[in-house]
Amino acid sequence: MRLLPRNLATEGYNEVVSSVTVQSEKRKKAEAKDLHHATRNAGNGLNGAHKGLLTVGQTARLLGISPSTLRVWESIGLVTPARSNGRFRLYSLQMLEVLKRIKYLRDAKRLSMPGIKEAIETWVGKSPAEEKDDQPEIGSRLRRMREQCGLSIAEAARRADISQGFLSSIELSRAHPSVATLQRLTSAYGTTILDFYDLPKRPSQVVHVKDRKALETKGGVRMEVLSFGTTLLECMLFRVPPGAGSEGAYSHAGEEFIYMLSGELEIWLDEIERYSIGSGDSFWFKSTSGHRFFNPSDREAVLIWINTPPSF
């Protein structure tokens, strides 16, 4: 485990905090703008069964890439768009999320095409039919949680620091929340991520592999519950694909412990301290620190993550 130098003066720290605030506002505006353009343009010039789909040109403009790049990604098997009468390529809003991920891995993470393909295959994971059987319905559950709290979409989005349009899209299952977004939403509703799992009502001291409950978020981060019915700890097995992570920071009450089974993970605390941990390393921190994580390597990171009390 390695702690990188911390040499930020007070003035520099204030600049960092200010920058983070500005970036948060920019992110919310960008989310709303992307959603507006996608829903407005989806289906323009299309009829019947093709309503709600984007053409090559529309998709390229939304992503800020050329149509030829989309064709290259298709030729190497990264995506498979629908076809209009066997001629025109058409992209769904769900596929648009996959394309955004591909662009991020290429531009920000500098992954090679084979690396991107592996990361995307892990991120996309199972077929829709398999996911429906294994995955809890995140969007509808979030909507019920919000309604039970008597919150409007506007108020819930404000508390979770996301845009109203993005929250609405999540509740309609048109967008998928990251680990950080999911945690901030459940916190705003006075609950935890554990409420998404169909856990047995009776505590169990033994959890067999076949009985393990799992939840997969945007980016392919898979969280498997290792303990049922505990009152003072929350134990999970995390699987973090290459180039994936929490996609944002979050904080809550308690303390956390991580043991790395394999792979590599970067953890940031309050956007100031950065820790790099690998196979066999362990790490603990106070949950009240804003924390985020990311897998910088080209292989899956597998780790045991414990929260106490169960506040994640």
Image (spheres, rainbow, N blue to C red):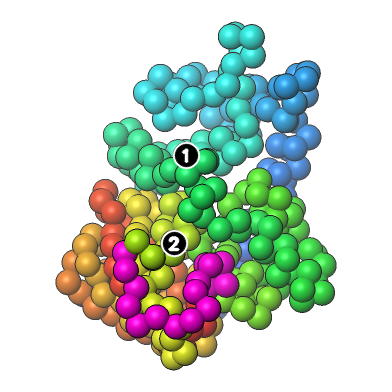
Q: Residue at x 40, y 54 (%)?
A: 244
Which type of secondary structure does the marked residue at label 1 adopt? loop
Q: Does 273 sit left or right of 263 as displayed? A: right
Compared across the picture, whether 293 is left or right of 133 comes to left
Q: Is residue 114 above or below residue 179?
A: above
Residue matched to label 1: 127
Separation (CA) of disc 1 from disc 2: 16 Å
The residue range painted magenta reads 193-209
State the predominant SS element of the stretch in magenta: loop
Residue 188 sits in which quadrant?
bottom right
Across and down, in percent, residue 175 comes to 62, 49
**Lower sequence index among marks 1 and 2:** 1
Q: Is residue 171 above or below residue 194?
A: above
Closest to the observer: 87 or 99? 87
- Decide which of 20, 304 is in the foreground and name it: 304
On screen, 105 above or below 171?
A: above
According to the image, label 2 marks what residue? Answer: 214
